[in-house]
Amino acid sequence: MRRALLSLAMLGLLACAAASGFMKGDTSSIVSGVAESTTTVVGLTQDLSKCDQIGAAEVTFDEERTIGGAVALNWVQQGGGLLVDVSTADGAALASPRTLGIKDTPRNRLHKYLNVVGKNLASRSTRPTLQWTFGVLDTEVVNAVSAPGGYVFVTRGLLKRVSNEAALAGVLSHEIAHVTRKDAFAIYQKTKVDQCKSLAYAKAGQKEGTAVLRAYSPGFINQAYAALQAFSGGALDLNSAANSALLTLFSDEFVHRYLEGGYARDQEIQADATGLEITVASGYSPRGFMDLIGGLPPGQNFFAHHPPPSDRVASMKLLLGKTRMASTTASGPASPFSPFSQDVTQLPLLPLHDELAAAR
Amino acid sequence: MRKSLGLLALVLGAGAAWALTPGDRVYVRGRDVAVLQSTATNAATLVKLQPGEAVVWRGADKKKPTWHRVETGGKSGFVYFANLSSTPPASELLTSPAGAKKVDAQAFASSGAAGKALTEGAIRYGNQDEKNKGELRPTMKESVRQTQTLEAIAAQRTDAEIAAQADRVTGEQR
């Protein structure tokens, strides 16, 4: 926990506060009362317009995977590292995941099991063909978190609370749902625009920008600004070396904002619903996840940003009851494939594999 | 109670009404989903389908309504209902020289983009000196190596392993 708090504090220093309150979306307002040359004002207006273009463009998968990878690295570091025995291969071999040699150790076998469970669940999601990756973070904090592009992490502390595979499946499915629903995009898109505008203000010498980006060096800001200048519309290629400073600006602030506020309450409730559907469609009893959530103290660790456990369990019970009823009444035609249309009380909890039990 | 109803409205808000008729196109969810010759537990597998594949729906079996008859590739057989979906998987937006292009899940799976591990941009992000100056452990560089190892473990899971897991979980229903 101390590590998590320390990490959060460090991120605050690095990424600075969100710029709410002084980010100007209306580009016409910036010129009033400011003693600047016309050239600067025109340049700033153009830059701010580019920021709006960047924010308006739909996020491509390539962008999602790159920002997701950067965010995932933050979760790994913040979470005390992964419970894996790393490969000693060189960089080229590491970049070829399908052929990289993996040590046969208990920790790696744990991850093999976790990924089989997770990939089976993900194959029943609306994004079955992503390169899904499931990992265990080496921390006692009770936590689960995802990153765009298909990264899902659970903590060792959470695994200690999981007593059957259905509960584990519920947790993984909830995080899968955040990825398939692209819940992070709401935070990310706003982050992009705000950071971009901070950059434009900073280059124009306005404190709105310099204050927000004070943790970054002038050289870094110049590099990021050059990338902004080069942007000519369309998809933003964050994977290119020329845009690496922008990737850092966006990733750092995304992580900061997520740790500060998490997802919206309705996003969490929806992720519970979608996750429950994936869990049940895969053949697990929903009871495992509901019992796990119901047993959590309100506001503990990662779950501090979630609705109270009692509300979450209540909404899931309502969902189960209502959808089952809908399949047998005239209130509307239910999908013949709804996994809730069967008697879910008959579905199994399934014991955990030895690999996971040993890791706890 | 009002609060509970609000939650229910939230979870069902995106719900849609389905009115399927025999002959409609439906989609597979799950990996290596078996199309069986009959609804019997030991029935022969006619073909195995992958996520997002479209099949023609003919309706639920009268005796075993959790099994639905479908047609695919000139074959007719039965699929467990939870392995079907009324809606196709989400499309993905890929970058191409001509601009961003939406592709369906099948095209995405065969595009190469689907198999992407940690991107060069993300690796560069984790390896930059500024990210590796603090005392936090693991370092970002170590986090990159750990994540790449994890991605290899994930990428090397085979369709057969995942299908076996699916059978293990759902076996009791059949």
Image: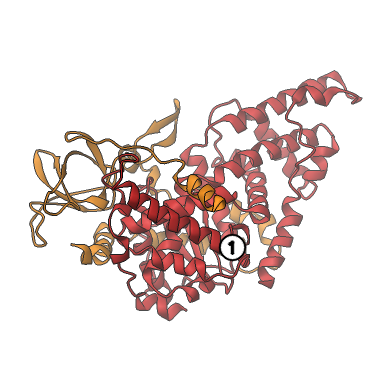
Chain colours: A red, B orange
Circle count: 1
Label 1 SS: helix
Which residue occupies the foreground of this view, B171 or A315? A315
| Residue A150 appears in the figure | no
The residue depicted at 49 percent of the width and 59 percent of the height is: A314
* In this rendering, position of residue A63 left or right of residue B38: right
Which residue occupies the foreground of this view, A298 or A207? A298
What's the amino acid at mark 1? Phe
Which residue occupies the foreground of this view, A90 or B160? B160
Which residue occupies the foreground of this view, B114 or A52? A52
Point out the residue furthest to the bottom here. A358
Vertically, is A170 above or below B88?
Answer: below
Where residue A46 sits: x, y (%)? 72, 23
The residue depicted at 67 percent of the width and 45 percent of the height is: A249
Q: Residues within 10 Å of mark 1 (few under 14, many from 20)?
A: some
Where residue B86 sits: x, y (%)? 29, 40
Point out the residue furthest to the top here. A38
* In this rendering, position of residue A197 left or right of residue B143: right
Where residue A223 sits: x, y (%)? 70, 39
The residue depicted at 84 percent of the width and 34 percent of the height is: A205
* Chain that bears disc 1: A
Mark 1 lies on residue: A303
| Residue A316 appears in the figure | yes
Where residue A253 sits: x, y (%)? 67, 48
> In what quadrant of the picture does the N terminus of chain A appear?
bottom right
* In this rendering, position of residue B52 left or right of residue B58: right
State the image quarter where residue A24 is shown. Answer: top right
The residue depicted at 46 percent of the width and 41 percent of the height is: B13
